[in-house]
Amino acid sequence: MHIDWAAFGQVFGVSLVVTVALVGVFTLGIVGTTSRATVAARSGAYACYALCAAAVGYGIYLIVG
Amino acid sequence: MEHITLLIGIVIVTALVFDFTNGFHDTANAMATTISTGALKPKVAVAMSAVLNLVGAFLSVEVAKTISGGIIDEKAGVRPEIIFAGLVGAIVWNLLTWLAGLPSSSSHALFGGLIGATLVSVGSHGVHADAVVMKVVIPAVAAPVVAGVAATAATRLTYRLTRGRDEQETAKGYRAGQIASAALVSLAHGTNDAQKTMGVITLALVTGGVVAPHSDPPLWVIVSAGVAIALGTYLGGWRIIQTLGKGLTDIKPAQGFAAQTGAATVILASSHIGFALSTTQVCSGAIMGAGVGRKGGVVRWSTAGRMVAAWCLTLPAAGLVAGGAAFLADQGDWGIAAVAVLALAACGAIWLASRRKPVTHDTVAGTAAAPHVGPAAPTASEPAGVVTAALQAVAPPPAGPIAPAVSPTSEAGRSPAAPAAAAS
Protein backbone atom coordinates (compact mmCIF):
# COMPACT_ATOMS: atom_id res chain seq x y z
CA MET A 1 0.00 0.00 0.00
CA HIS A 2 1.30 3.38 -0.93
CA ILE A 3 0.45 6.36 1.20
CA ASP A 4 1.39 9.68 -0.22
CA TRP A 5 2.91 11.23 2.87
CA ALA A 6 4.57 13.93 0.83
CA ALA A 7 1.22 15.16 -0.43
CA PHE A 8 -0.20 14.98 3.06
CA GLY A 9 2.69 16.95 4.48
CA GLN A 10 2.28 19.52 1.75
CA VAL A 11 -1.42 19.93 2.47
CA PHE A 12 -0.67 20.24 6.15
CA GLY A 13 2.11 22.78 5.70
CA VAL A 14 0.36 24.88 3.09
CA SER A 15 -2.89 24.91 5.04
CA LEU A 16 -1.22 25.93 8.26
CA VAL A 17 0.89 28.69 6.75
CA VAL A 18 -1.82 30.11 4.51
CA THR A 19 -4.51 30.04 7.19
CA VAL A 20 -2.35 31.71 9.80
CA ALA A 21 -1.04 34.26 7.32
CA LEU A 22 -4.47 35.13 5.96
CA VAL A 23 -6.08 35.42 9.36
CA GLY A 24 -3.12 37.44 10.59
CA VAL A 25 -3.17 39.83 7.67
CA PHE A 26 -6.92 40.27 7.87
CA THR A 27 -6.69 40.92 11.59
CA LEU A 28 -4.06 43.58 10.94
CA GLY A 29 -6.55 45.12 8.54
CA ILE A 30 -9.23 45.13 11.18
CA VAL A 31 -6.89 46.61 13.75
CA GLY A 32 -5.76 49.27 11.30
CA THR A 33 -9.24 50.43 10.47
CA THR A 34 -10.50 50.95 14.00
CA SER A 35 -11.71 54.42 14.82
CA ARG A 36 -8.54 55.62 16.49
CA ALA A 37 -6.19 54.50 13.71
CA THR A 38 -3.82 56.96 12.05
CA VAL A 39 -3.79 57.63 8.31
CA ALA A 40 -0.70 55.48 7.85
CA ALA A 41 -2.27 52.60 9.74
CA ARG A 42 -5.40 52.99 7.71
CA SER A 43 -3.65 52.78 4.36
CA GLY A 44 -1.66 49.80 5.59
CA ALA A 45 -4.91 48.17 6.59
CA TYR A 46 -6.36 48.67 3.13
CA ALA A 47 -3.29 46.99 1.70
CA CYS A 48 -3.98 44.07 4.03
CA TYR A 49 -7.56 43.84 2.85
CA ALA A 50 -6.40 43.96 -0.77
CA LEU A 51 -4.05 41.06 -0.06
CA CYS A 52 -6.94 39.05 1.39
CA ALA A 53 -9.13 39.89 -1.59
CA ALA A 54 -6.36 38.65 -3.85
CA ALA A 55 -6.25 35.40 -1.85
CA VAL A 56 -10.00 34.95 -2.32
CA GLY A 57 -9.56 35.60 -6.02
CA TYR A 58 -6.85 32.96 -6.17
CA GLY A 59 -9.19 30.59 -4.33
CA ILE A 60 -11.89 31.12 -6.94
CA TYR A 61 -9.29 30.58 -9.65
CA LEU A 62 -8.36 27.26 -8.04
CA ILE A 63 -12.00 26.17 -7.87
CA VAL A 64 -12.70 27.08 -11.49
CA GLY A 65 -9.45 25.76 -12.90
CA MET B 1 -32.02 9.86 -24.40
CA GLU B 2 -34.52 7.68 -26.22
CA HIS B 3 -33.76 4.50 -24.38
CA ILE B 4 -33.92 5.35 -20.73
CA THR B 5 -35.30 2.26 -19.10
CA LEU B 6 -37.38 2.37 -15.98
CA LEU B 7 -34.46 1.15 -13.90
CA ILE B 8 -32.14 3.85 -15.15
CA GLY B 9 -34.89 6.36 -14.53
CA ILE B 10 -35.09 5.16 -10.94
CA VAL B 11 -31.32 5.41 -10.56
CA ILE B 12 -31.37 8.96 -11.88
CA VAL B 13 -34.13 9.98 -9.48
CA THR B 14 -32.34 8.29 -6.58
CA ALA B 15 -29.10 10.02 -7.50
CA LEU B 16 -30.87 13.37 -7.48
CA VAL B 17 -32.39 12.57 -4.08
CA PHE B 18 -28.91 11.75 -2.80
CA ASP B 19 -27.68 15.04 -4.25
CA PHE B 20 -30.46 16.81 -2.42
CA THR B 21 -29.63 15.19 0.95
CA ASN B 22 -26.00 15.97 0.25
CA GLY B 23 -26.94 19.63 -0.14
CA PHE B 24 -28.86 19.98 3.06
CA HIS B 25 -26.44 17.82 5.00
CA ASP B 26 -23.55 20.02 4.03
CA THR B 27 -25.10 23.48 4.32
CA ALA B 28 -23.71 23.48 7.83
CA ASN B 29 -20.14 23.19 6.63
CA ALA B 30 -20.15 26.58 5.05
CA MET B 31 -22.81 28.34 7.01
CA ALA B 32 -23.03 27.03 10.58
CA THR B 33 -20.56 29.44 12.13
CA THR B 34 -21.62 32.23 9.80
CA ILE B 35 -25.11 31.92 11.22
CA SER B 36 -24.13 31.45 14.84
CA THR B 37 -21.88 34.52 14.92
CA GLY B 38 -24.63 36.57 13.30
CA ALA B 39 -22.59 37.38 10.20
CA LEU B 40 -25.60 36.47 8.09
CA LYS B 41 -29.24 35.85 8.90
CA PRO B 42 -30.08 32.14 8.62
CA LYS B 43 -32.29 32.46 5.55
CA VAL B 44 -29.85 34.76 3.80
CA ALA B 45 -26.97 32.43 4.59
CA VAL B 46 -28.61 29.34 3.13
CA ALA B 47 -29.83 31.29 0.10
CA MET B 48 -26.32 32.51 -0.59
CA SER B 49 -24.91 29.03 -0.12
CA ALA B 50 -27.55 27.58 -2.45
CA VAL B 51 -26.78 30.05 -5.21
CA LEU B 52 -23.05 29.42 -4.90
CA ASN B 53 -23.61 25.66 -4.97
CA LEU B 54 -25.61 26.06 -8.15
CA VAL B 55 -22.94 28.25 -9.70
CA GLY B 56 -20.29 25.79 -8.56
CA ALA B 57 -22.06 22.96 -10.36
CA PHE B 58 -21.57 24.74 -13.66
CA LEU B 59 -18.06 25.98 -13.02
CA SER B 60 -15.86 23.02 -13.50
CA VAL B 61 -15.54 21.31 -16.85
CA GLU B 62 -13.62 18.42 -15.39
CA VAL B 63 -15.96 15.47 -15.35
CA ALA B 64 -15.93 13.04 -12.49
CA LYS B 65 -14.55 10.15 -14.49
CA THR B 66 -14.85 7.67 -11.70
CA ILE B 67 -17.66 8.14 -9.25
CA SER B 68 -15.85 6.39 -6.46
CA GLY B 69 -12.30 7.51 -7.14
CA GLY B 70 -11.12 3.97 -7.79
CA ILE B 71 -12.53 2.45 -4.62
CA ILE B 72 -14.74 0.07 -6.49
CA ASP B 73 -13.74 -1.53 -9.73
CA GLU B 74 -16.22 0.08 -12.03
CA LYS B 75 -15.28 -2.25 -14.87
CA ALA B 76 -15.97 -5.39 -12.83
CA GLY B 77 -19.63 -5.36 -13.69
CA VAL B 78 -21.25 -2.36 -12.10
CA ARG B 79 -24.89 -2.54 -13.01
CA PRO B 80 -27.57 0.08 -12.40
CA GLU B 81 -28.92 -2.10 -9.56
CA ILE B 82 -25.66 -1.73 -7.66
CA ILE B 83 -25.59 2.02 -8.10
CA PHE B 84 -29.20 2.16 -7.00
CA ALA B 85 -28.56 0.08 -3.88
CA GLY B 86 -25.47 2.12 -3.04
CA LEU B 87 -27.41 5.36 -3.34
CA VAL B 88 -30.18 4.04 -1.12
CA GLY B 89 -27.65 3.17 1.57
CA ALA B 90 -26.07 6.60 1.35
CA ILE B 91 -29.41 8.42 1.48
CA VAL B 92 -30.68 6.49 4.49
CA TRP B 93 -27.48 7.11 6.42
CA ASN B 94 -27.48 10.79 5.48
CA LEU B 95 -31.01 11.16 6.77
CA LEU B 96 -30.31 9.27 9.99
CA THR B 97 -27.29 11.42 10.82
CA TRP B 98 -29.29 14.51 9.94
CA LEU B 99 -31.99 13.40 12.36
CA ALA B 100 -29.37 13.06 15.07
CA GLY B 101 -27.92 16.43 14.08
CA LEU B 102 -24.52 14.94 13.38
CA PRO B 103 -22.34 16.19 10.55
CA SER B 104 -21.02 13.21 8.64
CA SER B 105 -19.39 13.00 5.27
CA SER B 106 -21.81 12.58 2.39
CA SER B 107 -19.03 11.31 0.18
CA HIS B 108 -18.11 8.65 2.68
CA ALA B 109 -21.76 7.62 2.82
CA LEU B 110 -21.75 7.32 -0.97
CA PHE B 111 -18.50 5.34 -0.94
CA GLY B 112 -19.83 3.10 1.84
CA GLY B 113 -23.05 2.48 -0.06
CA LEU B 114 -21.24 1.62 -3.27
CA ILE B 115 -18.78 -0.63 -1.45
CA GLY B 116 -21.54 -2.49 0.37
CA ALA B 117 -23.60 -2.99 -2.76
CA THR B 118 -20.54 -4.11 -4.73
CA LEU B 119 -19.47 -6.57 -2.04
CA VAL B 120 -22.86 -8.23 -2.08
CA SER B 121 -23.45 -8.19 -5.81
CA VAL B 122 -20.01 -8.58 -7.32
CA GLY B 123 -17.86 -9.91 -4.50
CA SER B 124 -14.76 -8.70 -2.74
CA HIS B 125 -12.71 -8.48 -5.92
CA GLY B 126 -14.88 -5.54 -6.96
CA VAL B 127 -13.55 -3.43 -4.10
CA HIS B 128 -10.04 -2.09 -3.83
CA ALA B 129 -9.18 -2.30 -0.16
CA ASP B 130 -6.04 -0.22 -0.63
CA ALA B 131 -8.06 2.58 -2.07
CA VAL B 132 -10.48 2.44 0.86
CA VAL B 133 -7.64 3.03 3.29
CA MET B 134 -6.02 5.67 1.12
CA LYS B 135 -9.13 7.59 0.15
CA VAL B 136 -11.33 7.21 3.19
CA VAL B 137 -9.60 6.10 6.36
CA ILE B 138 -6.46 8.23 6.28
CA PRO B 139 -8.17 11.43 5.11
CA ALA B 140 -10.80 10.91 7.80
CA VAL B 141 -8.12 10.91 10.46
CA ALA B 142 -6.02 13.60 8.85
CA ALA B 143 -8.70 16.14 7.94
CA PRO B 144 -9.77 17.23 11.43
CA VAL B 145 -6.14 17.30 12.57
CA VAL B 146 -4.94 19.50 9.72
CA ALA B 147 -7.90 21.85 9.91
CA GLY B 148 -7.92 21.84 13.69
CA VAL B 149 -4.26 22.75 14.05
CA ALA B 150 -4.53 25.50 11.44
CA ALA B 151 -7.65 26.97 13.04
CA THR B 152 -6.17 26.80 16.55
CA ALA B 153 -3.03 28.62 15.50
CA ALA B 154 -5.02 31.21 13.56
CA THR B 155 -7.39 31.81 16.46
CA ARG B 156 -4.51 32.26 18.89
CA LEU B 157 -2.82 34.72 16.56
CA THR B 158 -5.89 36.81 15.89
CA TYR B 159 -6.72 37.11 19.58
CA ARG B 160 -3.17 38.16 20.32
CA LEU B 161 -3.22 40.81 17.60
CA THR B 162 -6.48 42.33 18.72
CA ARG B 163 -5.69 42.30 22.41
CA GLY B 164 -6.98 45.43 24.07
CA ARG B 165 -9.25 46.32 21.16
CA ASP B 166 -12.95 46.80 21.42
CA GLU B 167 -14.53 43.46 20.66
CA GLN B 168 -17.70 45.04 19.31
CA GLU B 169 -15.71 47.02 16.80
CA THR B 170 -13.55 44.18 15.54
CA ALA B 171 -16.50 41.81 15.29
CA LYS B 172 -17.81 43.66 12.25
CA GLY B 173 -14.63 43.06 10.32
CA TYR B 174 -14.52 39.41 11.29
CA ARG B 175 -18.08 38.87 10.16
CA ALA B 176 -17.33 40.36 6.75
CA GLY B 177 -14.29 38.15 6.38
CA GLN B 178 -16.27 35.14 7.43
CA ILE B 179 -18.82 35.70 4.69
CA ALA B 180 -16.04 35.64 2.10
CA SER B 181 -14.53 32.40 3.34
CA ALA B 182 -17.96 30.77 3.72
CA ALA B 183 -18.69 31.71 0.13
CA LEU B 184 -15.52 29.96 -1.00
CA VAL B 185 -16.47 26.81 0.90
CA SER B 186 -19.93 26.82 -0.69
CA LEU B 187 -18.53 27.30 -4.16
CA ALA B 188 -16.00 24.51 -3.73
CA HIS B 189 -18.75 22.27 -2.39
CA GLY B 190 -20.96 22.83 -5.39
CA THR B 191 -18.11 22.10 -7.75
CA ASN B 192 -17.08 18.88 -6.01
CA ASP B 193 -20.29 17.33 -4.79
CA ALA B 194 -22.62 18.20 -7.65
CA GLN B 195 -19.97 16.69 -9.90
CA LYS B 196 -20.20 13.47 -7.96
CA THR B 197 -23.90 13.14 -8.70
CA MET B 198 -23.34 14.01 -12.33
CA GLY B 199 -20.76 11.24 -12.43
CA VAL B 200 -23.22 8.75 -10.93
CA ILE B 201 -25.97 9.65 -13.39
CA THR B 202 -23.59 9.62 -16.31
CA LEU B 203 -22.29 6.21 -15.27
CA ALA B 204 -25.87 4.91 -15.08
CA LEU B 205 -26.54 6.29 -18.55
CA VAL B 206 -23.35 4.68 -19.85
CA THR B 207 -24.22 1.28 -18.37
CA GLY B 208 -27.63 1.59 -19.99
CA GLY B 209 -26.04 2.43 -23.32
CA VAL B 210 -27.82 5.77 -23.49
CA VAL B 211 -24.64 7.79 -23.87
CA ALA B 212 -21.26 6.69 -25.12
CA PRO B 213 -18.61 5.77 -22.55
CA HIS B 214 -16.27 8.60 -21.48
CA SER B 215 -18.66 11.24 -22.69
CA ASP B 216 -19.39 14.43 -20.81
CA PRO B 217 -22.61 14.55 -18.83
CA PRO B 218 -25.48 15.89 -20.93
CA LEU B 219 -26.61 19.41 -20.10
CA TRP B 220 -29.82 18.26 -18.45
CA VAL B 221 -27.77 16.15 -16.04
CA ILE B 222 -25.63 19.13 -15.06
CA VAL B 223 -28.67 21.34 -14.62
CA SER B 224 -30.67 18.85 -12.59
CA ALA B 225 -27.73 17.94 -10.35
CA GLY B 226 -26.99 21.59 -9.71
CA VAL B 227 -30.60 22.39 -8.96
CA ALA B 228 -31.01 19.40 -6.65
CA ILE B 229 -27.99 20.29 -4.55
CA ALA B 230 -28.99 23.96 -4.44
CA LEU B 231 -32.53 23.11 -3.35
CA GLY B 232 -31.21 20.86 -0.61
CA THR B 233 -28.82 23.55 0.52
CA TYR B 234 -31.56 26.15 0.59
CA LEU B 235 -33.82 23.95 2.70
CA GLY B 236 -30.96 23.87 5.15
CA GLY B 237 -30.09 21.08 7.50
CA TRP B 238 -30.83 23.19 10.54
CA ARG B 239 -30.14 20.35 12.94
CA ILE B 240 -26.58 19.99 11.75
CA ILE B 241 -26.15 23.74 11.55
CA GLN B 242 -27.11 23.90 15.18
CA THR B 243 -24.62 21.23 16.19
CA LEU B 244 -21.73 22.77 14.28
CA GLY B 245 -22.65 26.36 15.04
CA LYS B 246 -23.36 26.06 18.74
CA GLY B 247 -23.20 22.47 19.88
CA LEU B 248 -19.49 21.88 19.56
CA THR B 249 -18.28 25.12 21.05
CA ASP B 250 -19.44 28.69 21.51
CA ILE B 251 -18.20 30.56 18.50
CA LYS B 252 -17.26 34.22 18.63
CA PRO B 253 -16.82 36.17 15.39
CA ALA B 254 -13.03 36.00 15.56
CA GLN B 255 -13.16 32.23 15.98
CA GLY B 256 -15.76 31.85 13.27
CA PHE B 257 -13.53 33.75 10.89
CA ALA B 258 -10.46 31.72 11.81
CA ALA B 259 -12.34 28.42 11.53
CA GLN B 260 -13.97 29.30 8.23
CA THR B 261 -10.76 30.59 6.68
CA GLY B 262 -8.92 27.51 7.86
CA ALA B 263 -11.59 25.26 6.40
CA ALA B 264 -11.60 27.05 3.05
CA THR B 265 -7.81 26.93 2.89
CA VAL B 266 -7.58 23.24 3.76
CA ILE B 267 -10.29 22.30 1.25
CA LEU B 268 -8.66 24.22 -1.57
CA ALA B 269 -5.15 23.07 -0.67
CA SER B 270 -6.20 19.43 -0.47
CA SER B 271 -8.09 19.45 -3.75
CA HIS B 272 -5.30 21.36 -5.47
CA ILE B 273 -2.45 19.21 -4.20
CA GLY B 274 -4.45 16.05 -4.67
CA PHE B 275 -4.84 14.67 -1.17
CA ALA B 276 -8.60 14.63 -0.97
CA LEU B 277 -10.10 15.48 2.41
CA SER B 278 -13.76 15.42 3.32
CA THR B 279 -15.32 18.87 3.54
CA THR B 280 -17.45 17.90 6.52
CA GLN B 281 -14.55 16.65 8.56
CA VAL B 282 -12.40 19.61 7.64
CA CYS B 283 -15.08 22.05 8.76
CA SER B 284 -15.83 20.20 11.99
CA GLY B 285 -12.14 19.99 12.79
CA ALA B 286 -11.65 23.68 12.10
CA ILE B 287 -14.52 24.60 14.41
CA MET B 288 -13.11 22.46 17.21
CA GLY B 289 -9.70 23.97 16.63
CA ALA B 290 -11.12 27.46 16.90
CA GLY B 291 -12.84 26.41 20.12
CA VAL B 292 -9.55 25.21 21.57
CA GLY B 293 -7.70 28.31 20.37
CA ARG B 294 -9.64 30.89 22.36
CA LYS B 295 -8.71 31.36 25.97
CA GLY B 296 -11.64 30.15 28.01
CA GLY B 297 -13.12 28.44 24.97
CA VAL B 298 -14.80 25.14 25.70
CA VAL B 299 -15.18 22.28 23.27
CA ARG B 300 -17.98 19.95 24.21
CA TRP B 301 -16.13 16.72 23.74
CA SER B 302 -19.25 14.61 24.29
CA THR B 303 -20.79 16.14 21.17
CA ALA B 304 -17.47 15.84 19.38
CA GLY B 305 -17.32 12.20 20.41
CA ARG B 306 -20.77 11.50 19.05
CA MET B 307 -19.70 13.13 15.83
CA VAL B 308 -16.52 11.10 15.54
CA ALA B 309 -18.49 7.93 16.27
CA ALA B 310 -20.83 8.85 13.42
CA TRP B 311 -17.82 9.31 11.13
CA CYS B 312 -16.51 5.87 12.01
CA LEU B 313 -19.92 4.34 11.42
CA THR B 314 -20.66 6.14 8.17
CA LEU B 315 -18.87 3.75 5.85
CA PRO B 316 -19.99 0.45 7.42
CA ALA B 317 -23.52 1.62 8.14
CA ALA B 318 -24.18 2.94 4.65
CA GLY B 319 -22.51 -0.17 3.33
CA LEU B 320 -24.72 -2.44 5.39
CA VAL B 321 -27.92 -0.77 4.21
CA ALA B 322 -26.67 -0.79 0.64
CA GLY B 323 -25.62 -4.42 0.92
CA GLY B 324 -29.10 -5.40 2.03
CA ALA B 325 -30.59 -3.30 -0.73
CA ALA B 326 -28.29 -4.90 -3.29
CA PHE B 327 -29.25 -8.37 -2.09
CA LEU B 328 -32.92 -7.53 -2.56
CA ALA B 329 -32.39 -5.76 -5.86
CA ASP B 330 -30.54 -8.78 -7.23
CA GLN B 331 -33.70 -10.84 -6.87
CA GLY B 332 -35.21 -9.20 -9.92
CA ASP B 333 -37.77 -6.56 -10.65
CA TRP B 334 -39.84 -7.18 -7.54
CA GLY B 335 -36.67 -6.84 -5.46
CA ILE B 336 -35.91 -3.44 -6.94
CA ALA B 337 -39.47 -2.38 -6.31
CA ALA B 338 -39.20 -3.61 -2.73
CA VAL B 339 -35.99 -1.64 -2.20
CA ALA B 340 -37.64 1.48 -3.59
CA VAL B 341 -40.68 1.06 -1.34
CA LEU B 342 -38.56 0.32 1.74
CA ALA B 343 -36.32 3.30 1.03
CA LEU B 344 -39.32 5.59 0.68
CA ALA B 345 -40.78 4.21 3.90
CA ALA B 346 -37.49 4.75 5.74
CA CYS B 347 -37.23 8.33 4.48
CA GLY B 348 -40.83 8.98 5.46
CA ALA B 349 -40.32 7.54 8.93
CA ILE B 350 -37.21 9.63 9.50
CA TRP B 351 -39.00 12.73 8.30
CA LEU B 352 -41.93 12.01 10.61
CA ALA B 353 -39.54 11.51 13.51
CA SER B 354 -37.92 14.85 12.71
CA ARG B 355 -41.28 16.61 12.92
CA ARG B 356 -41.53 15.75 16.60
CA LYS B 357 -38.76 18.15 17.43
CA PRO B 358 -38.39 20.39 14.43
CA VAL B 359 -35.35 22.60 14.20
CA THR B 360 -36.01 25.46 11.82
CA HIS B 361 -34.36 28.67 10.78
CA ASP B 362 -36.30 30.39 13.54
CA THR B 363 -34.96 28.24 16.31
CA VAL B 364 -31.50 27.59 14.99
CA ALA B 365 -30.12 31.06 15.52
CA GLY B 366 -31.89 31.58 18.82
CA THR B 367 -30.00 32.11 22.00
CA ALA B 368 -29.98 28.41 22.75
CA ALA B 369 -32.12 29.16 25.74
CA ALA B 370 -34.59 26.39 25.29
CA PRO B 371 -33.15 22.95 25.90
CA HIS B 372 -35.92 21.42 23.84
CA VAL B 373 -34.47 22.68 20.57
CA GLY B 374 -31.26 20.73 21.06
CA PRO B 375 -29.96 18.53 18.27
CA ALA B 376 -32.97 16.37 18.50
CA ALA B 377 -32.46 12.70 18.62
CA PRO B 378 -35.57 11.02 19.92
CA THR B 379 -35.52 11.13 23.69
CA ALA B 380 -35.83 8.07 25.82
CA SER B 381 -39.20 9.16 27.16
CA GLU B 382 -40.77 8.84 23.73
CA PRO B 383 -42.34 5.60 22.70
CA ALA B 384 -39.72 3.59 20.93
CA GLY B 385 -40.60 3.70 17.26
CA VAL B 386 -38.89 2.04 14.37
CA VAL B 387 -36.60 4.98 13.88
CA THR B 388 -35.76 5.27 17.54
CA ALA B 389 -34.75 1.66 17.48
CA ALA B 390 -32.79 2.18 14.31
CA LEU B 391 -31.04 5.21 15.76
CA GLN B 392 -30.14 3.29 18.85
CA ALA B 393 -28.80 0.56 16.68
CA VAL B 394 -26.47 3.01 15.00
CA ALA B 395 -25.75 5.02 18.13
CA PRO B 396 -22.22 4.84 19.46
CA PRO B 397 -21.63 1.49 21.12
CA PRO B 398 -21.39 1.57 24.90
CA ALA B 399 -17.71 0.74 24.80
CA GLY B 400 -17.04 3.50 22.28
CA PRO B 401 -14.62 6.35 22.72
CA ILE B 402 -17.10 8.75 24.24
CA ALA B 403 -19.33 7.46 26.91
CA PRO B 404 -18.25 4.31 28.63
CA ALA B 405 -20.83 2.71 30.88
CA VAL B 406 -23.69 4.53 29.23
CA SER B 407 -26.21 2.42 27.40
CA PRO B 408 -27.28 3.57 23.93
CA THR B 409 -30.75 4.30 25.24
CA SER B 410 -29.75 6.71 27.92
CA GLU B 411 -27.09 8.17 25.65
CA ALA B 412 -29.69 9.04 23.06
CA GLY B 413 -31.92 10.46 25.72
CA ARG B 414 -29.33 12.36 27.63
CA SER B 415 -27.10 13.98 25.11
CA PRO B 416 -29.55 15.98 23.00
CA ALA B 417 -30.32 18.36 25.78
CA ALA B 418 -26.76 18.60 26.98
CA PRO B 419 -25.24 20.92 24.37
CA ALA B 420 -28.13 23.35 24.39
CA ALA B 421 -28.37 23.37 28.14
CA ALA B 422 -24.69 23.97 28.49
CA ALA B 423 -24.88 26.82 26.00
CA SER B 424 -27.63 28.67 27.77
Image (cartoon, coloured by chain):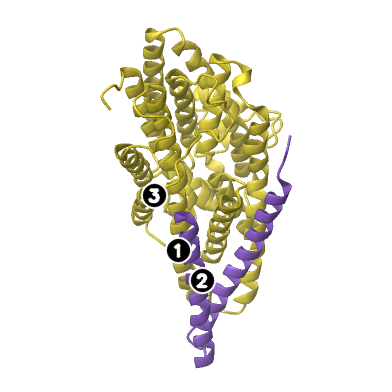
Q: Secondary structure at mark 1?
A: helix
In the rendered structure, which amino acid carries the disc numbered 1?
A: Ala
Judge whether B417 appears above or below B407 on screen: below
Q: Quadrant of residue B407?
A: top right
**Which disc number belongs to residue A52?**
2
Q: Which chain is purple?
A: A
Subunit that carries the residue with mark 1:
B
Where is residue B86 drawn, in percent x and y? 48, 24
> Which residue occupies 34% across, 28% down?
B13
Taking the image as shown, residue B175 lies to the left or right of residue B146, namely left
Where is residue B245 drawn, in percent x and y? 50, 52
In the rendered structure, which amino acid carries the disc numbered 3?
A: Asn
Q: Crowdedness of circle 3 by 10 Å Cα count: few (<14), some, many (20+)? A: many
Question: Is the residue under label 1 in contact with that under label 2 (CB below 8 Å)?
Answer: yes
Number of numbered labels in the structure image? 3
Where is residue B261 drawn, in percent x and y? 54, 61
Q: Secondary structure at mark 2?
A: helix
Q: Which chain is yellow?
A: B
* Front residue of this view, candidates B251 and B72: B72
User: Mark 1 to mark 3: distance in Å?
Assistant: 14 Å
Which residue in the rendered view is the most extreme toward the left? Answer: B2
Which residue in the structure is indicated by mark 1?
B180
In the rendered structure, which amino acid carries the disc numbered 2?
A: Cys
